[in-house]
Image: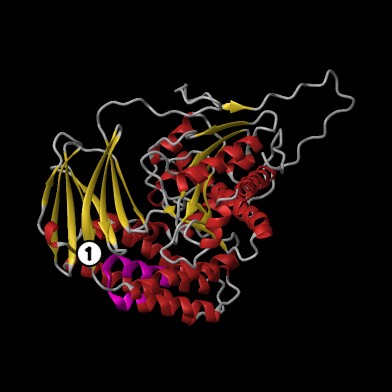
Amino acid sequence: MRSSGSASVAALLIGALALAVPAGGAALDAAAPYTELLAQEGRLRQELDLAPQLRAQPPGEASTALLRRLRALVGAYEDAARRSPRNAYSDNALWQAGVLAADAYWQFGDSRDRASALRLFALLKTRYPSSSLVAQIEGHTTRLNGAERTTGAATLTAIRREAFPDALRITLELEREAIFYEQRLDGPPRVFIDLRNAQPVEALKDASIAFPDDVVRQARVGRQANNGIRVVFDLQAATRYSVYSLYNPYRIVIDFERTAPRARTVLATKDTTDALPAAAVTAAPAAALPAAASAPAAPPAPAAANARGGFSLSRQLGLGISRIVIDPGHGGHDPGAQVRGLNEAELVLDIALRLEKLLLRNPGVTVALTRRTNAYVALDERTSMANRASADLFLSIHANASPSAAIRGFETYFLSFAPNPEAEAIAARENAASSKTMGNLPDLVKAITLNNKIDESRDFASMLQQSLHDELRKVDRDARDLGVKQAPFMVLVGATMPSALAEVSFLTHRQEATLLRSTGYRQRIAEALLSGIVRYQQSLKTAPRIASHSGAG
C-alpha cells in the first residue's frame, strides 16, 4: 500500500523529469517549448527548495507567492499546448499542467486549483485520446473527485502510542481522510504533522501528551489558521522516522526508530530466521559442466536496446542478472493494508516465497528476501540489504488499497530522479548529465550510474507490468492495467541496481480481495512476476538465462 500525504510533494519534485527527449534535431526542435518550461520548473524548485517549504510553511505570504508562481507555470504549459496543438509534446504539456494544478490543490487546498486540474485532464483526454498519458488520468481524477465529497473538516479523535523493541509508533486517528504534510526540524529536534481542514475533539484541543523515557518526549496539538491542526512530536534526539496512512478507519501512522543499539537486520535466508552475514543468500545449485563440448558454443546474443532505443551502461558492458533480492512489503508492527481480515504484509510474503521457489529452479541464480517472517525492516534498510549483497535486481511486492472500493487493477512503479529533458538529450549524445538535476551528485561517473539505473528500472517496471497484464487478465478479465508510473517510494531510494515496486491487486476491491485469498491466484501473481524478470533478463546479454516455470508450488 502506498503512503499518501507528503508523497504528493515528492511527486511534484520528480513528476516531469523522467520523460526522454529523442535524439535528433527535429525531435529537439519539437521539444524545445516543452523542455524550456521544464527547465523553468527545475530552476523554480532549486531556487525555492520546494519540498521543505511546501511541507513546512503554514499558509502565509511566502507560500502564497509560491502558489502564484506554480499557477503561472500551469498556465504556461497550457499556453504551449494551445499554440502548437500538433506538436508531439503538447499532450505532455497538458499532462504536466494538470499534475501541477492537482499538486497545488493538495498542497494549498484552494478548490480553484482542483477545478483547474480536472479541466486540464479532461482537455488532454478530449484532444489527445490516443496519448499514453490518458490511461494515467483516472487515478488523479478519482482522488480529486473524492476530495469534493469530503470537503468537510476531518476530526482528530485520538492519538495512540505503541511501543516495539526497535520503534515507537504513534497513530493519529481521524474520522475521515485528511490532507497532511510532515516535516522534521532541528534545534530542538522535532517532527510535525500539519492537517489541513481538520479539528481536534475537545479533549485534544491544545493538548500536550507526555511520553516519558522514549524517543518521543511528548506530542503537542495546536490549531492553525485556515481551519487546520499541527501535531508536534518533540524528540529526545534526531532519529529516523516514516509516515504513512491507513484506511478503514483512516489513520496517519508515524514510526520513530529507537536510537539505542539493536541487532542489525540482514538478509534472511531460506529455511532459517537466524542472523547471517549480509552476503549469505539462497542459491540454486550450479549446473554440472559437460566433460567436453561437441561444438563451439554460439556467441551470446548482444543486448537489445532499451525502451528508449539506446544502450544503458549495463547493456554496453553486457551485464546480466544472477542475484535477485525480493522485498515483501511491510511486516512486523507495520502490517500494511488490512481489509476484511486480509493482511497485506502476510499476503505479499506468501507471494514472495512463491516467487523465490520459482526462481530457484534456475541453476546459478541466487535469491534473497529482505524478510522471511513477520518481521519489521526499515524502508531504507531494504535497499541497503540489496546493495550489500551486490544484487543485480530488486523487486518490492505490495498489495494496493484505495478509499474508493471501485478502484481495482495492478500497477508497477519505478523511482525516477532523472534530469530534465534538456539535460537528458545531452546525456543521450555525450553520456553526461547535470549534477544539479541528478541529486547533486558530485561527478560525472555517479551521474551516469544514476541515469543507467533509471533507464533500466523503467524497463524492468514495464516488463513486470506487461507480464502482470498477460497473466492476471487470464483469471480476471475486468482487472485494470493501471500502467507504469513513477513515485518517490522510500523503499526504492538508494538502490544501486534496477529496482521496481509492484502493486499486484487492490485489497479494498471486493472481487480482488476474494482472489487474493486464493493460493492459486497468489501463485499466478508469482508466475507473472517471474515472467517479468525473465523478460527483463532476456533483454540483456546474460548467461545463464532464467527460465519461466509455471505450476503450483
Looking at this view, is 523 or 129 the one in front? 523
Give the labeled residue for mark 1.
155
Residue 139 colored magenta? no
Looking at this view, is 50 or 474 the one in front? 474
**For residue 150, side relative to residue 286 (left or right):** left
Quarter of the rendering containing residue 401: bottom left
Q: Position of residue 138 (x, y in %)?
A: 49, 70
Q: Position of residue 304 (x, y in %)?
A: 69, 47
Q: Position of residue 74 (x, y in %)?
A: 37, 73
Q: Is residue 277 above or below residue 360?
A: above
The answer to whether residue 294 of the structure is visible from this angle is yes
Looking at this view, is 353 or 40 the one in front? 353
Q: Secondary structure at mark 1?
A: strand
Q: Amino acid at mark 1?
A: Thr
Residue at screen point 20% across, 60% down: 57
State the extent of the magenta-drawn residues as a range.
97-114
Residue at screen point 69% across, 39% down: 541
